[in-house]
Amino acid sequence: ERETRIAKMEKNYMTNGFIVAEVNGDFQPTDNPNKSNEAITKAFNKTGETNFQLKKLRISNPLGLFTPLSLLNELRRRLYEQISIDLPQGSLPPKPKSQNRGTTGNFAVKVDNLNYLDDVDISKLAEVIYLISSESDIKGLKKFPKSKIRIALPSVCRRPELYQNIIARLLEQGYNKWEVANYWGLEVLPIERLDVHFDASIYTLNTQAIAMASEIGCSGVTLSIEDTKSNIKELIEKSNIATSLVIYQDVPLFISAGCIRKNDCKNCSHKDLWFKLKHDGRFYKALSRQCQMMVFDDRSFSIADTAQDLAPNIYRIDFVYCSYTAEQVANMLNEIMNFTNLTNCMSGNFLKNSI
């Protein structure tokens, strides 16, 4: 008679200081116990989105029984979901401080037009972040090392299906680093197998938010440009995932999914259209692009000269939405990467209540 063992499923419990999980099943003898043990080890090595790794596994299988993979996966899930890291509430394990802060390797440039980088020495950048639209021509990416490219999705998208083809093509071509600016990006990307960063529009203003980003598989966050220097400093020191700090950007004050043009969509050229606005003595710029409208302050955001003493993994410099030439970008980068503020810029809340 074949030897059969039935394990009774009990409620998960902790006994003698150990976390225990059980599942029930029909475990039959196997002709190759070593292969069965290999399958068990492989199953428990999959720690997924947890914050730990398997260090040691001891298998007790004296009867040489075969364990179905489905039961192994269920047992692993039941066990791992009980394990937590004992830390003070709201805190994160500190990460080692960057040893190369202030070097050129710490800079990333974000663009929505790859031609802006024609006069830039890419070797001095850690990353090029390319903000795509549903109509982007991705052929220009071929002139950059794939390892340095991060693909960014826009913050507002009412029709995600328009991005299906371009996302599929980029994934097929091996672009595995992405940036999402809204939660719709998490729905269209297989984040479990990608290096995904949050943009600043997904707010991470405290350690709990960064912890949640880490739990769902995010590998890095961009700290909010609305935050203060003192809080940003604390988040950088406590974050257990990569941090990015924007030190120059044309900041959209708001983005509307509605179009403000008078002509109908069929007869529209869909080219960028800029408007100048004035309200209460202040000047603004409005951009109509791809059936959306964005409003900007007349001044750009810049904190290069006051952010040098911080230690994010990446200092980020953005040239998106507004029009630039390659020469302008190269000259501006030279100043910003030397931690020099550009003229006629604002710093927002950065220096409020700072230490």
Image (spheres, rainbow, N blue to C red):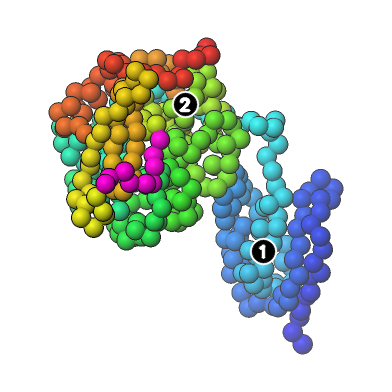
Q: What residue sits 47% from the left and 42% below the top?
A: 219
* Res 121 visible: no
Which residue, as the protein is rendered here, is positioned at the far top?
355
Which contiguous range is marked in magenta? 254-262
Residue 65 at what x, y percent from top left? Answer: 70, 73
Secondary element type, mark 2: loop
From mark 2 to mark 1, how far is it between C-alphas? Answer: 43 Å
Which residue, as the protein is rendered here, is positioned at the far bottom?
1
Q: How many residues crowd mark 1 within 10 Å: few (<14), some (14–19), many (20+)?
A: some
Q: Name the residue under label 1.
A: 74
Q: Mark 2 points at which residue?
A: 226
Q: What residue sits 34% from the left and 33% below the top?
A: 295
Q: What residue sits 39% from the left and 39% below the top?
A: 255
Asked where in the image residue 121 lies, by quadrant, the reply is top left
Q: Which of marks 2 and 1 is in front?
A: 2
Which residue, as the protein is rendered here, is positioned at the far right?
16
Residue 340 at what x, y percent from top left? Answer: 30, 15
Asked where in the image residue 79 lies, by quadrant, the reply is bottom right
